Image (cartoon, rainbow, N blue to C red):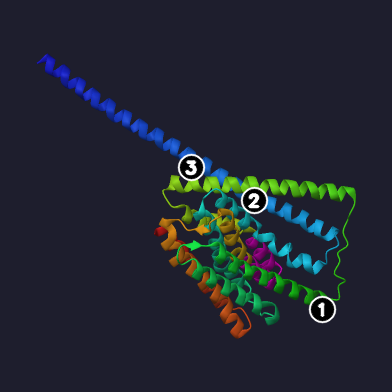
Amino acid sequence: MALRLETGTRLFAHRVQKVFFSSFCEIQGGILMSSSLIITILLFLLGLALIVKGGDWFVDAATWMAEASGLPQFLIGATVVSMATTLPEIIVSTMAAAEGSTDMAIGNAIGSVTANTGMIMAISLIFLPVAIRMSQFAVKGVLMVVSTLVLWLLCRDGVLSLPESLIVLALFVAFIIENIRSAKKLSAEEHTDGAAVVDKSRKALFKNLVLFAVGAACLVVGSNLLVDNGTVLAQLLGVSERIIAVTMVAIGTSLPELVTAITAIVKKQSSMSVGNILGANIIDITIILPLCALISGDGLHIAEQSVRQTVYLDMPMCALVAAIAVIPTILHKRFTKLQGILLLALYIAYVFVTVRI
């Protein structure tokens, strides 16, 4: 009897120990998981901050160098400045492509255009609808819609080949030519001499060389942090890289456009925000993915598990919000608050569907 009692006691103690040990391991595992998640999120945000600030420094220095070289002001505005706010997207996607993270590269490029139009432009139109100058809007607006449709059609087989990349790059060249033409016309209308007066002292030279180097370093380091930790974050949360790319990364790299939009709303100059978004979207569409395809060497291949969502959800939504932003505006010669509400509603629905599937 005593032996049975002792054996029963041992079995009970063993079971208690086993349950306690399992619970302890689960708690420890949960703590480690939480710690890893927090560290990953912090590194992700650090990468984002480095990209945004590094981009500012890099572009400021590049603009100074262009002005100091004697280039006409309209040419600088049409090239260097027009690419300023898209620099984070360009760097992140090309770095992702170089590391083989094609979902991150594609998701960031397409997601940024959708976020720019469906969220940032929508906010501008809701708070400050505006009339437009058709001479400045029509060509760029049509070019944005055409670019999204062309990219979608070319990628329907899951690959953007090198010859197809050249077709998309041709649209970028058309955008730059149109940008230079319109900027030159505007410069002539304002009777400017086309040259900016800049400080060319040694102090200014040293300052801008440092800004250029530090900005470039921040962009590279920040992009690595963003891509690497974006991938880890996807694994920790149990979602695909594509979801992280089209939501968190895309919105994060669109922060410069968001800042511009908020500033424009405060100054009651929403046309400035809209013009910036149009240019940024065209550059995102026509240069990022072709560059990624060239970096990959044999074209840009959409990951097999993401082809369906990318080709039948992300790209069509990108084209849809572009069409809603452009076509009614050309027909009525102004933006409306209703457009903004519709765009924002579509974007919220898109994000909801994206994280659910």
Q: Residues within 10 Å of mark 1 (few under 14, many from 20)?
A: few
Look at label 1 and name its amino acid.
Answer: Glu
Q: Position of residue 288 (x, y in %)?
A: 60, 60
Residue placed under numbered mark 1 in the picture:
189
Which tag, 1 or 2, sits closer to the chain's start? 2
Part of the protein shown in magenta:
257-282
Dot 2 lies on which element? helix
Q: Residues within 10 Å of mark 2 (few under 14, many from 20)?
A: many
Q: Is residue 259 magenta?
A: yes
Q: Is residue 30 magenta?
A: no
Dot 1 lies on which element? helix
Q: What whole-number distance in Å separates the C-alpha atoms at marks 3 and 2?
A: 21 Å
Look at label 2 and name its amino acid.
Answer: Ile
Q: Position of residue 109 (x, y in %)?
A: 56, 60
- Magenta stretch, main secondary structure, is helix
Look at label 3 and name its amino acid.
Answer: Leu
Q: Position of residue 226 (x, y in %)?
A: 57, 48
* Quadrant position of the N terminus in the picture: top left
User: Which residue is at the front of the view, 196 or 312?
Assistant: 312
User: Which residue is at the front of the view, 220 or 8?
Assistant: 220
For residue 270, side relative to residue 6 (left or right): right
Classify residue 108 by image quadrant: bottom right
The numbered disc on residue 37 is 3
Classify residue 18 by image quadrant: top left
Residue shown at the point (48%, 70%) measured from the top left: 316
Residue placed under numbered mark 2 in the picture:
51
Q: What whole-number distance in Å separates the C-alpha atoms at marks 1 and 2?
A: 36 Å
Residue shown at the point (61%, 49%) measured from the top left: 223
Q: Position of residue 153 (x, y in %)?
A: 49, 71
